[in-house]
Amino acid sequence: MQIKQITPPEAKAALDADPSAVYLDVRTEMEFAMGHPTGAINVPIASPDSATGGMRLNPDFLAVAQKVLPKDRPIFCGCQVGQRSQMAAQVLVQAGYTNVANVQGGFGGARDTTGWKAAGLPVSSEAGDDVSYAGLRKKAGL
């Protein structure tokens, strides 16, 4: 399935143009707390696995997303470079979300793609209950 790809400046312009649009930051809670696009919400697609030293998929990703995001809302999935967010976008589209895009380069940037922060776009470290994963899990009843 083909997921729409956009740059961080394109995502920012779309977020500014449509107040119902959401930047869904799928990085870990720690990454999110260290800085994220202003206005983003955090639902990690994966988290560190201390047993393997790698990442493990978040079994509650879709359940939380479905509780806090309407399926027809414009959603821009972002991570650190664009790989986890691509996976998250695919999960959302398979679950029936109709307006999902992957933010290429994510927050930190990739080899040939400038990330959100380096592009000089607004950054926040605010992590209140309305945007943090812990708060969104609670809102979802998990």
Image (spheres, helix red, strand yellow):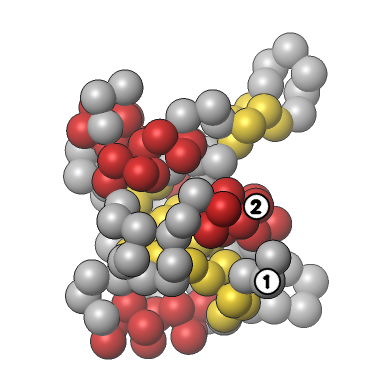
Q: Quadrant of residue 38?
A: bottom left
Quadrant containing the N terminus in the rendered view: bottom right
Tell me the residue at 44%/67% (across/down). Answer: 98
Tell me the residue at 32%/77% (across/down). Answer: 15
- The picture places residue 29, in percent across and down from the top left corner, at 45, 37
**On screen, 15 above or below 43?**
below
**On screen, 99 above or below 16?**
above
Q: CA distance from mark 2 to mark 1?
A: 12 Å
Q: Report whether 123 appears left or right of 1.
A: left
Tell me the residue at 74%/12% (across/down). Answer: 51
**Residue 4 appears in the figure:** yes
Question: Counting other residues with Cα less than 10 Å from the Cα at mark 2, is it few (<14), some (14-19), or many (20 or more)?
Answer: some
Q: Which residue is mark 2?
A: 87
Q: Residue furthest top?
A: 51
Q: Which mark is residue 2?
A: 1
Tell me the residue at 21%/33% (across/down). Answer: 139
Q: Give the total number of marks visible in the rendering.
A: 2
- The picture places residue 32, in percent across and down from the top left corner, at 44, 46
- The picture places residue 99, in percent across and down from the top left corner, at 43, 71
- The picture places residue 67, in percent across and down from the top left corner, at 29, 41
Q: Nearer the viewer, mark 2 or mark 1?
A: 1
Task: Look at label 2 and name its amino acid.
Answer: Met
**On screen, 11 above or below 28?**
below
Q: Report whether 118 appears left or right of 133.
A: right
Quadrant containing the C terminus in the rendered view: top left
Q: Nearer the viewer, residue 102 or 110?
A: 102
